[in-house]
Image (tube, coloured by chain):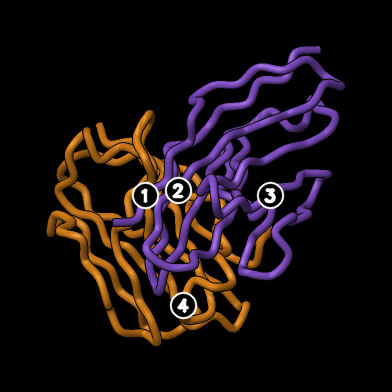
Amino acid sequence: ETGVTQTPRHLVMGMTNKKSLKCEQHLGHNAMYWYKQSAKKPLELMFVYSLEERVENNSVPSRFSPECPNSSHLFLHLHTLQPEDSALYLCASSPVGTYYGYTFGSGTRLTVV
Amino acid sequence: AQSVTQLDSHVSVSEGTPVLLRCNYSSSYSPSLFWYVQHPNKGLQLLLKYTSAATLVKGINGFEAEFKKSETSFHLTKPSAHMSDAAEYFCVVSEGNQFYFGTGTSLTVIP
């Protein structure tokens, strides 16, 4: 375990469903991130929360909605997804700034059917 | 503009032989550089990082990387490959609060 826990590990959902991905860290980090990893594509930064405030959106479709209720928890709410949204969704945390690098969770493998 | 280029998308080595995974970067300032490893169905794990101290950086599992500013390179090496090294490897450059990932190199280790 890295100290960043993601649940669920696997998720299959229909295009009309609503689901949420959860990320939790108790490393004392103040920044948390959602990344999307698709086959044969570079990692895509989706959202950044630093000190519980969103600092970057990167033009992610509105069917993805992040929530960061406190510095230890991060959610990604999903609704009316498309099959092309099937991917591995990775959560990461770090102290504020990138000097120390990220600690990643194991990811949620999402399949949209 | 910052960018990271991993020169090989796939590398195959025999068990017990050296590993070389190449990474070149472009950066306007003095960057921090990282190598991450990802095993199948797992998240990314930090192997090592360079943050303007010694140019030869030692990481976990016997991996090393050398920062060469004149060549803008940060290649990852290991003297002797092990079967458990088979994975995807990512070179990462950071500046300020931004991380820039390479597209990854898939390492295959042949018994």
Give the quadrant of residue B82: top right
Return the chain for callout 4.
Answer: A
Label 4 or label 3, whichever lies nearer to me, is 3
Q: Mark 4: give few (<14), some (14-19) or many (20+) Cα within 10 Å.
A: some
**Chain with colour orange in the figure:** A
Badge 1 marks a residue whose secondary structure is strand
- Residue A27 x, y percent position in the rendering: 62, 78
Q: Are marks 2 and 1 in contact (CB under 8 Å)?
A: yes
Q: What residue type is labelled 2?
A: Tyr
Query: The residue under label 3 is which amino acid type?
Result: Glu
Depth check, front residue: B18 or A4: B18
Graded by Cα atoms within 10 Å as few (under 14), some (14 to 19) or many (20 or more), the crowding at tag 2 reads many
Residue for badge 4: A97
Residue at image point 58% right, 38% down? B89
Spatial separation of the CA atoms under disc 4 and disc 3 = 23 Å
Q: How crowded is mark 3: few (under 14 residues within 10 Å), some or many (20 or more)?
A: some
| Disc 2 element | strand
Q: How far apart are marks 4 and 1 (CA)?
A: 18 Å
Nearest to the observer: residue B4 or residue B37: B4
Placement of the C terminus of chain A among the 4 image quadrants: top left
The relative height of residue A90 versus residue B105 in the rendered view (above or below) is: below
Label placed on residue B25: 2
